[in-house]
Image (tube, rainbow, N blue to C red):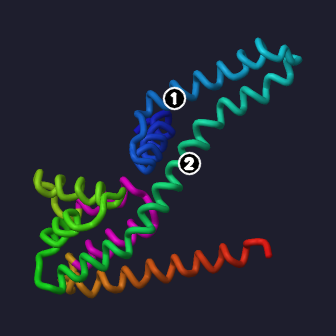
């Protein structure tokens, strides 16, 4: 990988984490257009002094990144909200004797439509196309790129490799995610003004 490709790869990874709202080329084009058009339109409309045109230039350059980071944050929040419930349903299905992949298929059918279910559908498609389960789980973690999903995928891969029951791993994972969410809520509560 060339050094010049690394920022592009980071951008592609961020776009994937945001749910692929556009391609990297479209994003870079949008960023270029805003970087040029905001200062030009500001100059045409307001006729400010030239040094003041730096402000709309910076805004045009930063605005697409702020939008992308906001999309990622909202997507992670949506996944984190549904992840413990999906893990609980997977645990119930596995505890009832279903194979893990059959349990995933059942959860996809029964759970309401959400970001996490869309990602689980992609996981199922990858496995049906011949990918190993551990590779599909790693791809899921890369696509969402949230610490909770990375931990979830890692736990399932380790349970698979060690031969431990997946039901136990799922139960521990759901409890850990709920505990983290509770701690994050407490932190936010402490930071909130009286």
Q: Which residue matches tag 1?
A: 28
**Residue 91 position (above or below residue 23):** below
Q: What is the secondary structure assignment of the residue under circle 2?
A: helix
Furthest residue toward right: 49
Give the label on residue 74, or none: none
Query: Residue 26 placed where, x, y %?
Result: 45, 28
Q: Bounds of the magenta span?
A: 135-159
Q: Residue drawn 41% across and 84% down?
A: 175
Query: Residue 59 placed where, x, y %?
Result: 71, 33
Q: Residue drawn 65% across and 19% down?
A: 37
Main SS of the magenta segment?
A: helix
**Residue 112 position (above or below residue 193):** above
Q: Which residue matches tag 2?
A: 69
Q: Residue drawn 18% across and 86% down?
A: 95
Of callouts 2 and 1, the N-terminal one: 1
Q: Residue drawn 22% across and 63% down?
A: 108
């Amino acid at each position: 990988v060339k050094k010049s490709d690394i920022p592009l790869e980071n951008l592609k990874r961020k776009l994937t984490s945001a749910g692929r709202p556009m391609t990297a080329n479209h994003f870079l084009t949008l960023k270029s257009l805003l970087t040029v058009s905001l200062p030009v339109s500001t100059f045409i409309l307001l006729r400010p002094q030239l040094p003041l045109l730096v402000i709309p230039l910076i805004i045009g350059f930063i605005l697409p990144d702020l939008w992308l980071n906001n999309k990622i944050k909202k997507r992670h929040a949506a996944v984190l909200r549904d992840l413990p419930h999906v893990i609980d349903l997977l645990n119930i299905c596995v505890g009832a004797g279903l194979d893990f992949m059959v349990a995933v298929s059942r959860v996809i059918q029964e759970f309401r439509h959400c970001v996490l279910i869309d990602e689980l559908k992609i996981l199922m498609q990858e496995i049906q196309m011949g990918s190993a389960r551990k590779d599909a789980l790693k791809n899921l973690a890369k696509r969402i790129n949230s610490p909770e999903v990375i931990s979830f995928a890692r736990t399932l891969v380790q349970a698979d490799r060690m031969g431990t029951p997946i039901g136990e791993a799922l139960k521990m994972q759901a409890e850990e995610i709920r505990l983290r969410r509770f701690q994050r809520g407490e932190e936010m509560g402490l930071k909130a003004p009286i």
